[in-house]
Image (cartoon, rainbow, N blue to C red):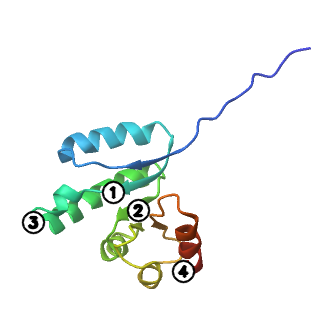
Amino acid sequence: MTQTPTVISAPKLYLLTNDDEFALLYRKLEAALATGFIALLQIRRKQILALPDGESRLYEEARQIVELAKAYNVPVVINDNIKLAAKLGVGVHLGQQDGEVTDAKHELQPNQVIGRTCHGNVELVEEAKMRA
């Protein structure tokens, strides 16, 4: 009797970007996405956004990252920026003080992900579910 080898699948990961210089970040993202282990990518570039031309830089960087993620069939969410998420056609992740789920639902398409920071707090999870 022969045994069929056991196939163990690795868990999928939720990846957040950092504030590395963009060319370096892009290379790291390409390597990470190529593994097939990334389930969702969150663009979170707070230091870039704080620069005088931060809004335009973030848009251009995010546009390139979204195209890269599409090549690997990985959905993307933008950190805290409903308008940018709508403009790029991706989802959004909202901190507790960074916008309302109901506003995101009005701005985004039904297939776009809306995430909410809940800090492991069951009450915050329930509140987010009610607004979803």
Is 69 on the left-hand or right-hand side of 11?
left
The residue depicted at 52 percent of the width and 58 percent of the height is 120
Q: CA distance from mark 3 to mark 1?
A: 17 Å
Residue at mark 3 to residue at mark 2: CA–CA distance: 21 Å
Residue 132 in the image: above or below residue 24:
below
Q: Give the Cα separation between the discs numbered 4 and 3.
A: 34 Å
Query: Type of residue at label 2?
Result: Val
Q: Point out residue 47 in the picture as x, y percentages from the top left corner.
A: 18, 56
Which label sits in the foreground, 4 or 3? Answer: 4
Is 54 placed left or right of 119 in the picture?
Answer: left
- SS under mark 1: strand
* Mark 2 element type: strand
- Circle 4 — which element? helix
Q: Give the class, few, some or many, for how many residues have Cα within 10 Å of label 2's Cα (few <14, many ≥20).
A: many
Q: Can you identify the residue that label 2 sits on?
A: 77
Q: Residues within 10 Å of mark 3 (few under 14, many from 20)?
A: few
Q: 59 or 96, which lies in front?
A: 96
Which circle's residue, 4 or 1, is located before the other in the chain?
A: 1
Q: Is residue 51 left or right of residue 5?
A: left
Instruction: Identify the disc placed on residue 131.
Output: 4
Identify the residue under disc 1: 43
Q: Are marks 4 and 1 in contact (CB under 8 Å)?
A: no
C-alpha distance separating marks 1 and 2: 6 Å
Q: In the rendered structure, are the residues bearing label 1 and label 2 in contact, judged by CB atoms less than 8 Å apart? A: yes
Give the image location of residue 38, x and y in percent: 48, 45
**Mark 2 vs 4, N-terminal side:** 2
- At horizontal 28% and vertical 59% (from top left) the residue drawn is 62
Pointer 3: what residue? 53
